[in-house]
Amino acid sequence: MLRLSRLTDYAVVVLVRLAQTGNVETSPGIAQSVGIPEPTVAKVLKGLAQAGLVASQRGARGGYRLIRPLSAIPVSAVIAAIDGPIALTACVEGTHGTCDSQSQCPMAGRWSVVNDAISDALSAITLADMQRTTLPVSTQVAIGIPTSGAFVTHE
């Protein structure tokens, strides 16, 4: 099963919370409002700041704020910020993983097509899209969902 880490899930929650308030928020304040332990929120915010998705502000009115709107943050950027580059296997081109059988493997280097398709799909969906109950047609087409109208409801 392909599964994202819990920290990536929390990162999405933290980013959406920052967007909802539109203000500078502290790590303890975010933790209390979303029900995630503060040390975990602090860890997530550190990764998001390093990736340039949030900015930290020091001082008495310090905390974290979004750098760009949710509509400009693809899901792939959040995954990369927390879990690193999207790579399904150790032998995907551009990753630093190693495989003991790579020199003998008949599939060596061929996972890139699958990895690229998943990466492209995750890049086509923004956090703003996730907040909606419907996906715009452009997103549906980008991720391969058949379209029959302007929007498709996902429940």
Image (spheres, grey):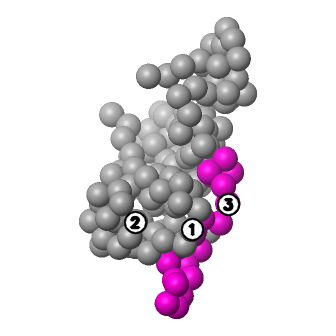
Q: CA distance from mark 3 to mark 2?
A: 18 Å
Q: Is residue 84 left or right of residue 55?
A: left
Mark number, residue 68? 3
How crowded is the residue under tag 1: few (<14 C-alpha within 10 Å), some, or many (20+)?
few
> Where residue 39 sits in the image (x, y, percent)?
30, 72
Q: CA distance from mark 3 to mark 1?
A: 13 Å
Question: In the picture, residue 77 is in which quadrant?
Answer: bottom right
Q: Is-magenta flag for residue 70?
A: yes
Query: Is 101 above or below relative to 144?
Result: below
Mark 2 lies on residue:
30
For the residue pair 110 and 57, the one nearer the viewer reads as 57
Instruction: Say which residue appears at 44% left-offset and 75% top-offset.
Output: 26
Report the mark closest to the observer, 1 or 2: 1
How crowded is the residue under tag 3: few (<14 C-alpha within 10 Å), some, or many (20+)?
few
Report the mark closest to the observer, 3 or 1: 1
- Image marks 3 and 2: residues in contact by CB distance under 8 Å: no
The magenta span reads: 53-74
Q: Is-magenta flag for residue 149?
A: no
Tell me the quadrant of the picture where the N terminus can be found.
top left
Residue 112 shows in this picture: no
Question: In the picture, residue 38 is in which quadrant?
Answer: bottom left
Q: Is residue 63 left or right of residue 74?
A: left
User: Which residue type carries mark 2?
Assistant: Ile
Q: Secondary structure at mark 1?
A: loop
Q: Is residue 7 left or right of residue 71?
A: left
> Where residue 52 sits in the image (x, y, percent)?
62, 68
User: Which residue type carries mark 1?
Assistant: Asn
Mark 1 lies on residue:
23
- Whichever of callouts 3 and 1 sits on the residue coming sooner in the sequence is 1
Q: CA distance from mark 1 to mark 2?
A: 11 Å
Instruction: Say which residue appears at 53% left-offset and 60% top-offset.
Output: 21
How crowded is the residue under tag 2: few (<14 C-alpha within 10 Å), some, or many (20+)?
many
